[in-house]
Image: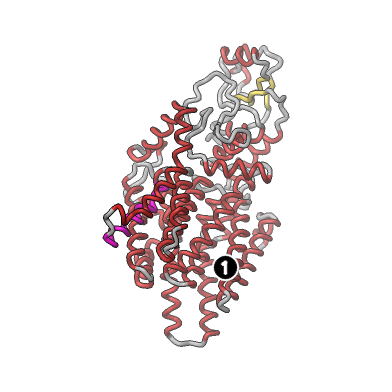
Amino acid sequence: MHLFTTYFSDTQILLLVVSLLALLSSFFFHIKGKNNLALMLMLFSAFSIFCFGALLDPFLNLWDERFHALVGKNLMHHPLMPTLYDDPVVKMPYDRWDRDHIWLHKEPLFLWQIALSFKLFGISEFTLRLPSVLLGVVFVFISYRSGMLLINKRVGYLTGLLIISSLYILELIGGSRGLDLNDVSFMVYVSLSIWSFIEYYFSGNKRWIYLIGLFSGMAILCKWMVGLLVYFGWFVLKLQQKKYKISHNKDLFASIIITLLVVLPWHILTYIWYPSEATSAYKYNNEHFFTPIEGFRGSFWYHFEMINIIYGAIALFLIVPAFYFLFKKGKEKPLFYSLLGMVLMVYLFFTLAATKMPSFTIVVSMIIFISFASLWDKMLDFVEYLKIKKRVFNCIFFLSIFAVILFRFDIELLQEKHTTWKKDNVWTAMLKHNKEVFKSLNLPKKSVIFNVLGRHYIEAMFYTGLPAYNFIPTKEQYDDLKSKGRTIALFKLKKADELPDYLKNDSSIIIINEEIQGDD
């Protein structure tokens, strides 16, 4: 307990305590049948624990949070022009995603969310992650609702508990899992489209058609075409219902039109305004399927091995029985096959894709969490079958929740990874140090920073608001900057005599006598 109170801040400890108390209260009202109040308290618990996650790292994480933070910050000033180098003052090729001027490496919706959060609440690591916190709460709600519709209220409740106690989701919200807010937004918007599809199936209300289209479009505007996943599931459902005629599929086509109306304007504009950058970005994105981009490769079984990391230590052994009980307990078998089809399609697609990244498959995590909740619910059914007293059953129910949370929510691991508790955690110490260096710089407004180690020029630009580069300017670049009235600031070289004469002889050059740590 001493370590816990020493290395987490008072705010973080308070958030953990509040989250736990809200969850306990939620359980009490759930067993009393006051489901709306239980859900509200669960959502409050989720908000508190996700805020705790957003405070885990008081710095920008490297892959890819720092890039998203910088582009989001720049979008505050020109929402329709996403830039990485907002002030590309140095003459050089801005021809890669990690040094572009116009940054179309990712779709813009989640970046707009960052910009809006910065605009409303100020610029900080927490406000950078605040959209993820809110989307995480939305994810808990729609997962609860979907589990309730598919099976029962207890499955919905258990699904929410599994999400709240997921370290993977927590770290994704906290920016320390790639690709942070981008993957959170993509996961939630795809899940919102699937939830709307489930609501439409059970209610038949036409408004859900438009929401399916809206959320699918928003998913595409976060990442790319996997945002259309809900339509594959809908297609599987139509095949089961033997609805082959166009007249039988007006709802499906109407939803697709909504999706196109959401997606096309941005892509048309980017091709008109930034044709070369748009063409390059789309080409690069398409290469992910055929080429292991930037070394992100893995075996055929990569995404199946990731199941234990994303969902828990023994999840791979439980996933087949989990889906079996989702099938057995589900109210509508055609809908089950539709949802299963989406899961299989995602795992098949990303298994065949050459580029492997951990979070690619989490777009179907809502369905998988519901399946695990179905297995848990079945185990509770067995206890109820023993016809024990209600009070005893509630104790067993509570103990099962306690055991699952204790097993899944490893506080010690979080402390080890995200604090300086363990002295060998050089990552946290390094990024804290670099942030302090960048924030301590007091340079003239028209300065340009050079010789920033690795890709840490991204954090340098975020924290200083000045253009930064990881090389020493050439004579031509030096002359151009001087003609523009720019001040050159330079992180010191290991050997002073390595400095070119045109810099060495210029007394206006600012030498920064600080060391940037790390090489990425």
Residue at image location 59% in from the left, 63% down from the top: 43
Above or below: residue 293 compared with residue 445: below
Q: Is residue 100 left or right of residue 248?
A: right
Is residue 241 rendered magenta in the image?
yes
Rendered image quadrant of residue 79: top right
Task: Identify which amino acid the numbered label 1 is placed on.
Answer: Leu
Residue at image location 52% in from the left, 85% down from the top: 390
Q: Tally the marks.
A: 1
Q: Which residues are magenta?
A: 226-242
Camera-side residue of 210 and 297: 210
Q: Residue 122 in the image: x percent, y percent?
A: 68, 43
Q: Residue 249 in the image: x percent, y percent?
A: 33, 54
Q: Quadrant location of the N terminus? A: bottom right
Question: What is the chief secondary structure element of the magenta stretch?
Answer: helix
Camera-side residue of 362 and 341: 341
Residue at image location 47% in from the left, 55% down from the top: 192
Above or below: residue 236 compared with residue 286: below
Q: Which residue is mark 1?
A: 39
Rendered image quadrant of residue 413: bottom right
Camera-side residue of 83 and 348: 83
Rendered image quadrant of residue 432: top right
Q: Is residue 368 visible?
A: no
Is residue 125 rendered magenta in the image?
no
Q: Is residue 352 visible?
A: yes
Q: Residue 180 in the image: x percent, y percent?
A: 52, 47
